[in-house]
Amino acid sequence: MKYFTLIIAFLLFSCGKKEDVLLPKSDVTIVKDVQDLSPVYIFFKAQGKDTIADVNRKNSIISTNWIFNIDKRLPLKLVIPEVMKLQEKKRADSAHKNENAENYYSYADSIGKNLAFLPFTKVYYKMEIANNRSQLYFKKNGMIRYSGRKIYDFPKKNLKPFLDSLVINPKAEIKFSYDKNMSFGAYIQCKILVKTMADKKIPFVFINQDEEFVF
């Protein structure tokens, strides 16, 4: 437990500022260790009645793995535009580009008591409504809306049985959308859930993880 606390303390204060990043939490580790990394911080700031996403990437090197340490309280409508800008900057820098360098979100595994990472290098975000026949929309209230031939609303915990029961054209795909007012902490939990479902290769369902819509 002490070791876990030290890791988190180093992460939160390594940028040299007296600012905290409250990391998202989950009960599973997707990636436990990342080498050759650079930190990116997106802090939660209150300015009057407004909430601001304050970005600090002074120590990030294009050719390394980028670790995005993002405050879980920030809404997606503030976080994702900043993430998109940073992704584009890294993708466009051909002079220093490293094809093996990845982007990861950091979070805390509350069960394993360790820092964990979620890769999202290949994800392209769009701040718009998805134009796709089959999609799953994660709402801020914890419910999921499936839009296909019919529309269903169900709790997030029922995602696996829903996908197990779903049969669509094998050439079709399911895309994922997220409520722009959802907190980043809730978003990470949703992404981890999707990741575990996609890795199980559910029959008759092609899950597209490379494009996400936020609206």
Image (spheres, rainbow, N blue to C red):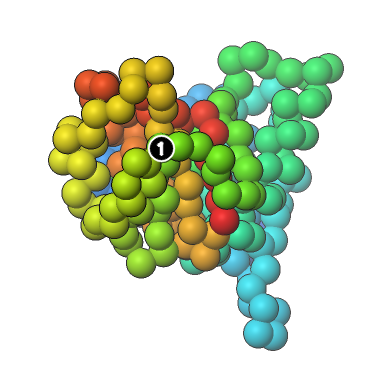
Q: Is 158 rendered above or below residue 92?
A: below
- Pick the residue in front: 135 or 38: 135
Label 1, secondary structure: give it. loop
- Pick the residue in front: 14 or 146: 146
Q: Percent from the top left, x then y, of residue 141?
A: 36, 67
Q: Is 46 rendered above or below residue 128?
A: below
Q: Percent from the top left, x then y, of residue 205?
A: 30, 26
The image quarter in which residue 46 lies? bottom right
Residue projecting furthest to the bottom: 48
Q: Percent from the top left, x then y, of residue 102?
A: 57, 25
What residue sits 32% from the left and 47% below the top? 150
Q: Is residue 16 left or right of residue 146?
A: right
Residue projecting furthest to the top: 99
Label 1: which residue? Answer: 134
The image quarter in which residue 89 lies? top right
| Quadrant (top left/top right/bottom left/bottom right) for the C terminus | bottom right
